[in-house]
Image: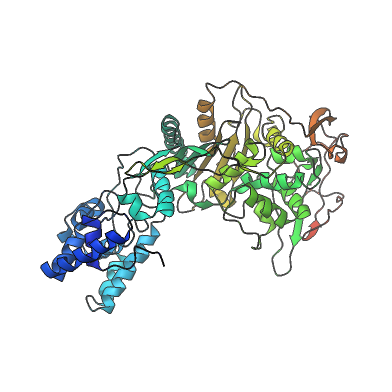
Amino acid sequence: NGNLQGGSTITQQLIRSSMLTPEQSIIRKIKEIILAYWTEKIYSKQQILEMYFNQIPYGGTAWGANAASYVYFGTDVKNLTLAQSAFLAGITAAPTRYSPYGADPSLWKSRQKEVLQRMVSLGFITQPEARQAETQNLKFQSQEIPIHAPHFVMYVKNLLIQTYGLAMVEHGGLTVRTSLDLPTQNMAEAVVTEEVQKAELLKVGNGAAVVTDPKTGDILAMVGSKSFSDTNGGNVNITTALRQPGSAIKVVTYAAALTNGFTSASILDDSPVTYQTAGSPPYKPVNYNGQFFGRMPLRLALANSLNIPAVKVLNQIGIPTMVKLGIEMGINNWNETKQYGLSITLGGAEVSMLDLTTVYATLANKGTRIDLNPLIKVTDDKEHVLFVKKEPKGEKVLPKGLAFILSHILADNNARTLVFGINSPLVIPNHTVSVKTGTSDNKRDNWTVGYTDNYVVTAWVGNNDNSPMSQELASGITGAAPIWNKIMTQLLEKHHEQPLTPPGDIVVKPCFGKTEYFLKGTEDNAYCSYPPTPTPVDSQSTTQPTPTPAPQQEEKRQNDKRPRPFQF
């Protein structure tokens, strides 16, 4: 079948790893078989097994069982407990996958249990001994990695393994050039560490950040946690983990709305509402601060990240419309065949930080999605080029004008003052920057994502165990926002102001006493007289209800007080 690797005995694996190159060829396979034959003639099975365990990789710099014992537990192999020995025996099958310092540390535990149960079935230990070993809390040595950007390095290594295989990556002598910008990486690491420490009183235990170039998909910085060597899951790369994005995902909802007849001047109603679906409890969305602001333009609803208008818009355009566009904009774990609820527009469906960054990079890149790629060039030990990055073409998923409108709303500091005030950390003085915040249920995740033509910066704070942060954490003020602000400010220090320029498919029209932007053909959809003023109203107020949109789910509106005429 063309597979030159094939099955192998322990002896063949010993010969392959100690005496031969990783090259896969018929000649090398013949050599392996012959050498294995003579090895078994000369050495006993016990000696062969001992040699095998003393030279195979156990992950990282650990080669051989005794070296691995010191790397993971800081002691000689003869001092290991049953639980520790079972861990080392299990990790050899896939050192990267089962590493306690890898992206999913729970994998090593399940592998350890497999080894212990196998020992029980073979009669080496009893079931009570296995259970006792399983419950032992293993303390691993702190990994003070003598490398820069360890989360990024491990991320790249995993990508290479997926493409070229573990043997080639660990034994093939690859030379890898990446997109990482070390000064940017060092700066971002310092900011995350400093700001997470400042936020400890808000029950913030961890933070992460990503910096990318939206034009190329280059990852310029990747900070997967506040410290890779932190024993409390510091090695877990939050940038690749699935977390709830909160309101940061609303840009997908409004992008879908703008492609389906809505405009930035469309009047939305921020008033109490209840949705009822057969077989499910009533869904009553509320705003971040528990208030209602009445009727307002879409621009203000998005800029102030109000929940109820976003849910009502999604109910009109349909959940599948949003999901489809989210996938097109870069969310890889969403599935069009899965049933999502209206809460998806408030962050009810998890995404990774890298995918969320790609979504915003699509807006920064004027509607063209360019997938993230940290690799620039890969060569083998003979300097053969295995990969070289070409100029990305990307995929056009949004009209330029639509991306411009969303970017303009997210950069409109006057529009967002209703909730965030005039001098929030979302403002970068002397620079036009589009930015959005997000906070998940019970404040388990807090985000700030912002961009210019040259940079996308995504910042996150939260806790690895998914425990909630303090209720006093204020989205856009504390938490992720200061991290985002400091990183973006330093990135833009040497850049001149780049104002947003309307593309050719935009029509400019006076609206509500201001200049408003419309996609060509939608300018007549807008009602540009003065709507009511957004004014906080508590949930107990009552007055006349407003008209109901064409529903995706049955909608029941509660009455609310009508504010006074709209003013800017």
Nearer-the-camera pick, 420 or 114: 114
Residue 134, picture quadrant: bottom left
Q: Is 161 rendered above or below residue 281?
A: above
Q: Is residue 322 visible?
A: yes
Is 128 situated left or right of 44 in this image? right
Q: Position of residue 437 (x, y in %)?
A: 61, 40
Measuring 58% from the left and 48% from the top, which residue is drawn there? 245
Measuring 28% from the left and 62% from the top, which residue is drawn there? 29
Q: Position of residue 413 (x, y in %)?
A: 68, 30
Q: Is residue 103 visible?
A: no
Is 554 situated left or right of 462 in this image? right
Nearer-the-camera pick, 64 or 40: 40
Measuring 63% from the left and 52% from the top, which residue is drawn there? 327
Nearer-the-camera pick, 520 or 350: 520
Nearer-the-camera pick, 386 or 175: 386
Quadrant placement of the N terminus = bottom left
